[in-house]
Image (tube, helix red, strand yellow):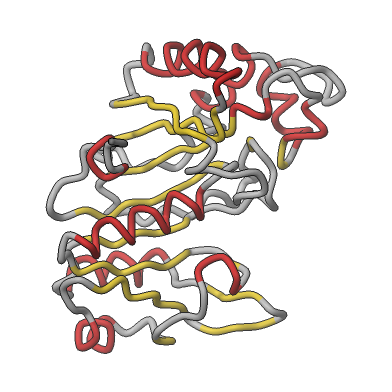
């Protein structure tokens, strides 16, 4: 039996989890929300960026007011909270509002998609990214193993920035070492993470033929002193086209 993701990641009974990177964030968000609600946890799901409505369905409530959220939080329910909708995008909450919801409501878990990647497989953040709440207890950094071996320009969001971080032209392939460099760089995967937060790396979209490659990448990630845990997940957890 597959170990639930919440257990693989070692989530505690009360967490503010921010998910950043590319190649499976929304799938991880939905998986954790479903698992935690099934355990009778009180779960709030939101974003600090923008999401397409089909990624999580329609928000349950539209507000940044912790008091309104507090009145709707319930054990066994994953409550999707957003601020507004415009241009067919769900607009998320400010980081400060997420912090207040975590601090001022009975939600045991607040899950936040805190980055955008336009459905690419790895990314380097722009100056305004990621948008991680300061009270985050755990930050999950995501990348897809499907990016390895392909031209950086074909698989990376902000490919020029990825190229700068690894010292390569965007037309060159993304190797395991280059992927690790991006994910572990202070201006890459580790950018903007609160100093007291746990840092978890999740390599997604792993298939039988890429297990060895994924193991090589997670080994490099695990060796970094800032990383608390690095795991890989099967393709069913982070399918092609996941954000």
Image point 25% across, 47% down: which residue?
Answer: 137
Q: Nearer the viewer, residue 137 or 45?
A: 45
Q: Position of residue 78 (x, y in %)?
A: 31, 71
Instruction: Please tell me whether residue 132 is drawn above or below residue 55 in the rendered image.
Output: above
Q: Nearer the viewer, residue 236 or 20?
A: 236
Image point 33% across, 61% down: which residue?
Answer: 34
Query: Which quarter of the figure is the N terminus placed in?
Result: top left
Q: Report the residue that reaches farthest toward the front.
A: 1
Q: Position of residue 29 (x, y in %)?
A: 42, 55
Count of numbered tags: 0
Q: Position of residue 60 (x, y in %)?
A: 40, 84
Q: Is residue 152 left or right of residue 212?
A: right
Instruction: Please tell me whether residue 25 is drawn above or below residue 209 in the rendered image.
Output: below
Q: Nearer the viewer, residue 241 or 96?
A: 241
Image point 56% across, 27% down: which residue?
Answer: 207
Q: To which quarter of the image does residue 175 belong?
A: top right
Instruction: Please tell me whether residue 74 is drawn above or below residue 191 in the rendered image.
Output: below
Instruction: Please tell me whether residue 230 is drawn above or below residue 204 in the rendered image.
Output: above
Q: To which quarter of the image does residue 69 belong?
A: bottom left
Q: Position of residue 220 (x, y in %)?
A: 46, 12
């Amino acid at each position: 039996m597959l170990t639930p993701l919440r257990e693989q990641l070692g989530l505690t009974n009360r967490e503010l989890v921010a998910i950043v990177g590319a190649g499976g964030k929304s799938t991880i968000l939905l998986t954790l929300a479903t698992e935690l609600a099934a355990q009778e946890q009180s779960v709030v799901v939101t974003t600090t960026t923008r999401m397409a409505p089909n990624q999580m369905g329609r928000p349950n409530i539209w507000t940044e007011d912790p008091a309104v959220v507090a009145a709707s939080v319930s054990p066994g329910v994953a409550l999707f909270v957003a601020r507004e909708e415009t241009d067919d995008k769900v607009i998320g909450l400010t980081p400060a509002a997420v912090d207040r919801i975590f601090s001022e409501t009975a939600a045991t878990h607040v899950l936040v998609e805190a980055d955008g990647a336009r459905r690419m497989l790895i990314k380097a953040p722009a100056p305004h990214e990621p948008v991680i709440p300061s009270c985050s207890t755990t930050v999950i950094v995501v990348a897809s193993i499907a990016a390895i071996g392909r031209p950086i320009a074909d698989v990376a969001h902000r490919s020029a920035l990825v190229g700068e971080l690894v010292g390569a032209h965007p037309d060159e392939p993304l190797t395991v070492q280059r992927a690790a460099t991006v994910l572990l760089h202070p201006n890459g995967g580790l950018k903007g993470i609160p100093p007291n937060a746990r840092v978890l790396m999740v390599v997604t979209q792993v298939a039988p033929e890429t297990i060895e490659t994924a193991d090589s990448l997670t080994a490099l990630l695990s060796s970094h002193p800032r990383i608390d845990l690095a795991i890989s997940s099967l393709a069913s957890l982070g399918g092609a086209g996941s954000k």
